[in-house]
Image (cartoon, rainbow, N blue to C red):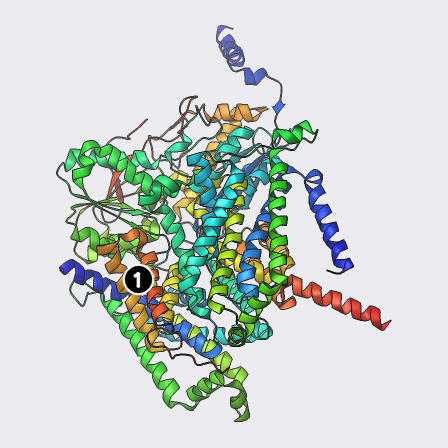
Amino acid sequence: MKFKLVPIAALLAAALASPTALAQKKYDPGASDSEIKIGNTNPYSGPASAYGTIGKTIAAYFKMVNDQGGINGRKVNFVTYDDGYSPPKTVEMARKLVEQDQVLMLFQTLGTPPNTAIHKYMNTKKVPQSFVATGATKWNDPRNFPWTIGWQPNYQTEGRIYAAYILKNKPNAKIGILYQNDDYGKDYVKGMHDGLGDKAKTMIVKEVSYEVADPTVDSQIVQLQASGADVFFNVTTPKFAAQAIRKAYDIGWKPMHFLNNVSVSLATVLKPAGLEKSVGLISTAYLKDPTDKEWTNDPAIKKWEAFMKKYYPEGSLLDPSNVYAYTVASTLHEVLKQSGDNLTRDNVMKQAANLKGFAVDTLIPGIKMNTDQGDYAPIESVQLMKFSGTQWERFGAVMGK
Amino acid sequence: MSRRQLIVLAAVLALACVLPFLVSNYRTFQFNLVIIYAIALLGLNILTGYNGQISLGHGAFYAMGAYCTAILMDKFGVPYWATLPVAGAVCLLFGFLFGLPALRLEGLYLALATFALGVSLPQLLKYHQLENWTGGVQGIVIAKPEAPAFFGSLGLRLNPDQWLYFFTLAVAIVMFVLAWNLLRGRVGRALVAIRDQHVAAEAMGINSAMVKSLTFGVSAMYTGIAGSLGAIAVQFVAPDSFNIFLSIVFLVGIVVGGLASISGAIYGALFIQFVPNVADEISKAAPWAIFGVFLIGFVYLMPMGVAGALRMAVARLGRKRQNT
Amino acid sequence: MDAFFHQVIAGLATGGIYASLALALVMIYQATHLINFAQGEMAMFATYIAWTLVEAGMPYWAAFFLTVAFAFVFGVVIERIVIRPVENAPVLAVVVVFIALLVILNSVTGWIYTYTIKTFPSPFPAEPIFGKYLTSHQGGAIAVTLVVLLLLFAFFRYTPLGLAMRAAAQNPESSRLVGIRVGWMLALGWGLASAIGAVAGVMVAPIVYLDPNMMGGVLLYAFAAALVGGVDSPGGAVFGGFLVGVLENVLGAFVIGNELKLAVALVLIIGVLVVRPSGFFGKVLVTRV
């Protein structure tokens, strides 16, 4: 009999330890016995519409979840609106979601300026602005903004990781930086500056920027080469990253080349640039790239592919944004599961800040999400990698927490 | 104004006043934006509709007004209402100065000059030398004004959205009345004369260059004040809010609403506020495609804009009544 | 000095991009006296057609000429179906139709082909021609632009159809009297402009990569280029393209930094236009009172 008592005791202990298991069902607007309503804004039109695929993948993900019976028996109703990456429109749409559609929470609202525009509003309204789709550092500020939480590794941390690598492996480097002239680009540059510390002034020999509307970055690459830099920190989005890699190679500039994580996709950046021109690139990873042969037969990627084919057939199997969206949607899935029957905004936020070693199988092995009341940055670790000419080869330990 | 027009106007005003008490706060906010866009479109219409000068860069003046307000509120603690006249004055002056040389340029070249302004301003806002003022790429977050206590003591409790709506409405009424006065009198006739027959206008003693530059200034002032109100309503300014598409959307607004028509500004504002939302509801896959189809549809059915179509409909009705 | 030289060459290469689209803008302007905002998106759309054909296994040049032919028909059809019904509307209403076309083409292309960038093949050899300065594709693209310019010149100068088109644009009433079908001349102008745009798109895509927003930035510069050269002069448009390309590179690299290079380049251009209001090569417009 003894051994039979153990599970019962464990059950009892678990029940006592987690009040949710015994608690009555509790709901805030947007949650009920049958439904959880989640709000989102994405740029489906306008200059940033390339990111619109993220919203579409998330919608497809929750369709799959609903087909499989929902979360704790509740269907997810994912309501997403187009904001065209325009902050005033985001404000309007966030208000529509919160005040008219009465969603439980916002999820994956995209872009730093749009999220900044609704930051204060969401926190005054006490509605979660969860797992925002931007890598700025300001989303990890639970003391002042307890209702906003980030998700991806932030840009500054990544910049600091490259800085540490340079200090260790090439202490006399002359660094040239190309960055997109917006919050995203400047965050990376700041990370690099912070990481280099006092040496930033002497080591960084040239910083050049480009605008999203620029047709090419050829002129900037020529400027960087002329500056005599022997390390190139390439902070660009996919199209410009491909141009920059190709141009640097074509003009015979062979620096130690750091490419930001935003543009590490094999199929949409390195192939267009030319694989032979990409040899030696150094970057970081936290997500599996479906087009890197290391992962093409990975069970998680296979599962993702099957999901894409069934629920979002018009989506691209090459686009890493679609893996990203799948992974972040899995995170929300977990948080809602953890929330159990206590679907109040307060509890959802508490659970979002209570991820303990949570891993989605589309993340690089060893990368886990950890959050607590004082730490609103779910993914804080990445791994360095180098491009061999056919695939990315990860090296060193998983860095960060 | 005919008696019928007065009745319509009174009805519209009455509706505008009770609206915030009938709809949700979110809708109130949307209508607040409509009024703001209407002021901006009125400004552009004075320039393009009445005076025949095409501007592809009025978003820049909207941005300028917005940043004036944001900087004054954020850096100097100026109360929101006091920033409006400053924003208006800055835009008036800048518009006038911009107008002086630009007006040597006819038609398309003026379009290029204004286009350049619309393209350059967001870049200027990001420029690192100005970052201490503009907040650079991060923009500026500002506080939302509360209804003055005065209304509470009268027993009229207004929430911030309602208050802001009435504040904007009051400003809009003033601006519309001023525009109406301006355009129906000597100045208005001079503007139209320059648009249609500029040589004849000069022969009649109109200082064409001066009038054109001043029109540019006044037009910029209207749009700037709208931008200022927009910043207060949205509580945030950033370069991304004011890209060249904003200028193009304004142009779309005045054409759809009706060129050279004061009421056209309101129809145009309703269009640019609500039609993109409708398009988004219809298709997530390609919302812009739907929006484009709406645009073409409007131009086909109402080439003179909504205001022009209404005018014709009223005229036709009147004729019918006479015939019977 | 080497850096300066390099920037100038790079500027000529990007200038060639602007010039090719500016040529298409000038074409439409000559036929209709309007600037077509949708020109860039029409070119982008045609380039996707070419991409589809090449991906389907068609030889490059076959795909190229088929695409140009398609673009020509596409331009004519757009004129007949979309523009013709509003020909009597105010000018600005037509401009709004252009904007509508722009957003529709952009959105539909993104929907069909997704937004991930695609590589587009180049017909020119992979080895660089001017050492490290210019890839052979960039050089080839400039040559193609100049060839198109020459063909246009010859077409308008020496062929009856070209002369008829010019006549129809300059004086529709008299042209009608001598038996020119003015309506069809307009449609042909659209077709030609669209075809030139397709050539531009196919030449640009290998340099900037193919994506639905490929032409958004280029259009800004092409617009400036066309106006600098005088919007009614094809040669001027090409010159304007090169000027804008070199100017922005040199200013960005050596004078004011990259952040404001477009702004300053535009201001300079406007400064010039204030002094010479009809552009460098445009005819001074004489209006009859």
**Residue depicted at 36% across the width and 69% down the height:** C273
Name the secondary structure under disc 1: helix
Could you tell me the amino acid type at mark 1? Answer: Ile
Left or right placement of residue A202 versus residue B258 in this view: left
Residue B178 percent across, percent down from the top left: 61, 54
Residue B167, located in which quarter of the rendered image? Answer: top right
> Would you place residue B189 above or below residue B57 in this image?
below
Q: Is residue A209 visible?
A: yes
Q: Is residue B292 visible?
A: no
Residue A284, located in which quarter of the rendered image? Answer: top left
Residue B177 percent across, percent down from the top left: 64, 53
> Would you place residue A189 above or below residue B175 in this image?
above
Left or right placement of residue A134 versus residue A147 in this view: left
Quadrant placement of the C terminus of chain A: top left
> Would you place residue A179 above or below residue B202 in this image?
above
**Residue depicted at 40% across the width and 48% down the height:** A319
Q: Hey, which residue is sitting farthest bottom in the picture?
A: C178
Q: Hey, which residue is sitting farthest front in the picture?
A: B205
Residue C255 percent across, percent down from the top left: 23, 55
The residue to which callout 1 is attached is C207
Q: Which chain's residue wears label 1?
A: C
Q: Hey, which residue is sitting farthest right in the picture?
A: B324
